[in-house]
Every structure is written in structure tokens, then in C-alpha cells.
Image: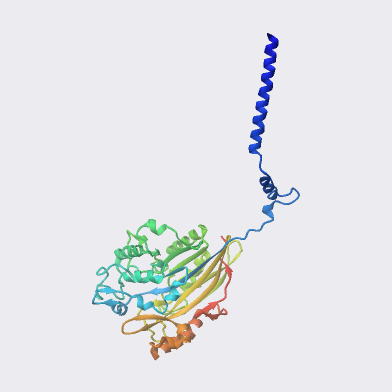
Amino acid sequence: MKKQVVVILIEGVILLSLILGYLFFKENQTKNPSYEDIATEVVYQAPVEMEPASENITVEEETLHASLTCVGDIMMHSWQINRGYDAATDTFDYMESFTYVEDYLNEADFTFGNLETTLAGRYNGANSDVHGYADYPMFNSPEVLADNLKELGFDFLATANNHSLDSWEDGVYATLDYLDSVGIPHVGTARSQEEKDKLCIMDVNGITFGFSCYTYGTNGLPVPSDAPYCVNSLYNYDDAAINEMCENVRRLDEAGVDVVMPIIHFGTEYRVPPDDWQKMCVDRLFEAGADVIIGGHPHVVEAMEVRELTNPDGSKRTGYVIYSMGNFISSQRYENGVMKDIGIILDMEFEKQGDHTYITAWRFAPVYVYWKDDVIGLVPVVEAYENRDQYSFLTEGDWGRIEDSYQKTIETLNSISQMDYEVVDYEYSFPVYSEIDPK
């Protein structure tokens, strides 16, 4: 009996072993790779004697590109308001003013300028003398101006200047509300302390630009004590206010943006050489970390400057400034040698590779404001100068101004840095290629 049990047990063990062996074989057959799999694995396996593949392969970093266009003071006097008014429909439109410079504005990836008027709404300004809107000294312009700027390709507007409070505190807020409604971001005025304190950073094709905007003052109109955030004012160059402006620039720099670009409304009206206040503010802004400084207010073109700077750690960087862009569109005219009818369009190009951002183009196109019975508009000076037959509507007086500005604008721009330049595509082009302060 015991023998039979032993035999049965042995046979059972043998049978169980056969079954387990078969199952083991099937399992391994399922998991083992095919020949093709083995070959693939061998191809991608680095030989033991070689360095790791990752140290032998150079991966090119993607190069990013961004082009920016900037214009000066955008103003709207009664002569412009009247010419854009259609009595039959009781509407306004100003697109015709920009016919000859439109291509200069919409070619860039990002276009911006200084809105030197309020958009408080019809009959909501300091007065309503011009079809319900207001002229100098307290501007309130037809809101359609913002629609026109959007159609022209403007992506951003600076709103802190000496006319920010022309329609009082409510006009500040109404202006921002309307810009929001047409989709134009802004900096320089605010509806709350939270909005003022928020860093203004724009991403253009993967390159980040940090903007701030301050004005020297507001024409004696007091910034409301219960709403000090509504206008970024320097209170006529008060030291504490300048420190605040510089701290805003430091915050942008420390946030790691690629290009820090403060916009500042400062200087002396109709004076061509930068004054001492401008020089001081520029020095302070560069010290705080600014890379490119955009200036306005004098209503005439002032010098540009390319400056070699030294960081606190001893490293070098290059700073760029234009002290005044002059007027872009306005009704101010040439008078006693003061070129209030001339402004500039500034084109800048940037590229970024890894953590390194470079400015690769620095170009200026002067523009001239002409007057006709039905429009006050702009023409590009260099293009008109070199293609007179295409601008036959201009008068001899206009041509005298264009010829004068063709010579004097570049002399003014180049009066500090005195750099070599050439005329390329109707712009004064300064060959630059320098790294913006490494972050």
C-alpha cells in the first residue's frame, strides 16, 4: 500500500514537473524579443569603451526672433478731430491719416506708442467744444482713435503722460476700459493698486519684454490722494517717485525677463538736447537694470544713445536709449526752427538662444505730418525724399520740410553716440549686435 502511494507520488511529481516546465517554456517564449528587437537594442547600445552618447551629440538650441516697432506721441487736436468727422453719420474715423505709414506699423511682431490723450467718451471731457470732444490744453478724443490704432497693428500703448488726467480721474478709468474693449494692453495708468503693482510682461515669439511707464508730472493737475495708483507720476522728479520707478525696473529685471524696456515721459518741451533731468533719469534706469529706454514729451526728436555699461559684478552690457521720439501724429507745426512736425518710427529686432538675448537691429524712419483740407496725415520722410513722384499731393512747402528733416533728423539722432549708419529700406540703420544683460 505504501509502495503504491510512493509510486503515485513519484508519478505525480514527474507529471507536475512536466507541466511546470512546459508553462515556463511558453512564458519565456512569449517574453523573449524577436531577432528584429534584439538587433534594434544592439544598435542603440553604446559600446563600453566609448563615452556616453549624450556627451557626443551637440543639440542646437532654437533661435527665437522678435521685431518691435515704436512710435512717439499720438495726439488729437481740434484740426484732426474736425477732419475725421462725418456730419452725415455723426461718426469719426482717422484711418486716412496713416495711409502712407501703415506698412511701417504692421510689419513688426509688436507695435506700441504713447497715447497722449484721453478716451473719456463724448461729452465726458473737460469741455465738449469739438463735436462733443476736447482740444488742447485738456484733450479728450473720439474713442474710434483706439479702434483705428488696433486696425493699424498697435499691440500696446503707454498711457502715463502729462495729459493723463485731462478728463479727471474718471477719464483715466474710461480710457483704460475702452482700450480693454478693443484689445489693446496698456501700462502707466491703473484702476487699482493691484493693477498698478502687477508687472507688465509681454511675450513676443518666446522672447519676454518687461515694460514700465512713468511721466514727469500731470500739468499741475493733482493725482487724487485717494487714488495715487491712477497715474505713474514722478511728481516733477521727486526722489521717492524716481526710486519707485527704478524699483519697478529692478522687479522686472529680477523676474528674469529677457529685455527690460521702461517708457518715460520727461524732458523740456521743444528742446532738442536732452536736459539734466533726462540724463539723471536715464542713468538711474540703466543702473536699475533697464536695457532699452523709450523717451517722449519734448514734441521734437532728440538724440539716441548706445551706451556701454558695467554691472555691479564687473561684467559689461550695452544699453540703448532714445531720449525723445517726437510727435507721431498731431496738429503741431514747424515754427521758428522747432521741428514739431517731425517724429520717428523706431524698429528694433531681437534674437534669443538659450539664456542669451541679443539686439540685432536699431533703425529709425522719420515721419512728417502734412495738412490737407480733408486730412492731416503722415508720410515717411526718406521714402518720400527718394520717390518724390509718388507723393505728388505734397506742396512745395511740404517738400521744403521733408528735405530739411531728411538732413537734420539723422544729425540729431546721432549727436551723442555718433555711430556709423546706412540707409536701408528708407530707414537710418545703425549696425548693432550686442547681448542684452544676461539673466
Foreground pick, 30 / 231: 30
Q: Quadrant of residue 175?
A: bottom left
Q: Quadrant of residue 129?
A: bottom left
- Can residue 44 be seen? yes
Residue in the picture at 68% in, 24% down: 17
Q: Is residue 37 left or right of residue 395?
A: right
Q: Is residue 109 left or right of residue 184?
A: right
Spot the residue most to the bottom.
396
Relative to 68, say whether 43 is above or below: above
Foreground pick, 70 / 276: 70
- Can residue 219 be seen? no
In the picture, which quadrant includes the N terminus?
top right
Type of colouring: rainbow
In the picture, which quadrant includes the C terminus?
bottom right
Q: Is residue 384 left or right of residue 20?
A: left
The location of residue 355, given as percent across then percent down, is 58, 60
Foreground pick, 255 / 161: 255
Residue in the picture at 40% in, 77% down: 327
Residue in the picture at 76% in, 49% down: 49
The location of residue 369, given as percent across then percent down, is 39, 81
The location of residue 244, given as percent across then percent down, is 44, 61
Spot the residue most to the right.
49
Relative to 395, say whether 198 is above or below: above
